[in-house]
Amino acid sequence: MAPNVVKGVRLAPASVLFASLLCACSGKLEPCTGVTVGAKYELNVGALVPQDGAPPDCAADWGFADGNVFAAQIVDTAGRDVCDSGVAEMSGNGGWSLALNNDGLAAGGALLEGDYTIGRDTCSGSAVLEVGCDASCLNAHTMPCACRLSVNAHGAGGCPVSCSVVVAVSVSRL
């Protein structure tokens, strides 16, 4: 059968494109491993994962210091690539407030992914956070898993220097 022909009816190229886009965009992705709305996790921040150009203390300056513990509760899911990541409200002992804005442009494929307003004292900025774990991790297990926390934080007057780093994080399901 010739391209753009369905049961003897020739389709215009625009119709084929529209039908392809409709099929690709309809429906939500399956949740990633460990992603369930209502699930709660504890994130224990570890050491900075070496990266080119990252100031050594920038994660700590934004509250993600080695030893800090955060709680995350998944309130929604979002993604567009592999699977839906969890969108979580977060709190913790980093000395900063973290208010969930939205899922940002969640690519999916992570345990947690979201945009936050971050603040302390005279600093108000934004942070994009993503927690990625090995696929075999957190599948209904309560044992801690070794994961990575990507932090991209920036703000104006009174804020630390902009920071785009990856830190090690141990994640446990509560």
Image: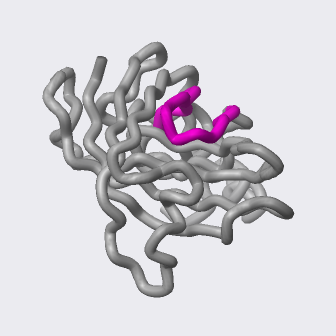
Residue sitting at 61 percent across and 52 percent down? 128
Quarter-of-image position of residue 144:
top left
The answer to whether residue 94 is left or right of residue 156 is left
Above or below, comparing residue 103 to residue 149 in the picture: above
Residue sitting at 41 percent across and 31 percent down? 31
Residues drawn in magenta: 85-99
Q: Position of residue 146 (x, y in %)?
A: 21, 47
Above or below, comparing residue 40 to residue 137 in the picture: above
Q: Main secondary structure of the magenta part?
A: strand
Question: Toward the viewer: 88 or 57?
Answer: 57
- Could you tell me if residue 89 is visible in this image? yes
Residue sitting at 76 percent across and 52 percent down? 125
Question: Toward the viewer: 75 or 117?
Answer: 117
How many dots with numbers?
A: 0
Above or below, comparing residue 103 to residue 57 in the picture: above
Q: Position of residue 29 (x, y in %)?
A: 47, 35
Q: Is residue 92 magenta?
A: yes
Q: How is the image coloured?
A: one colour
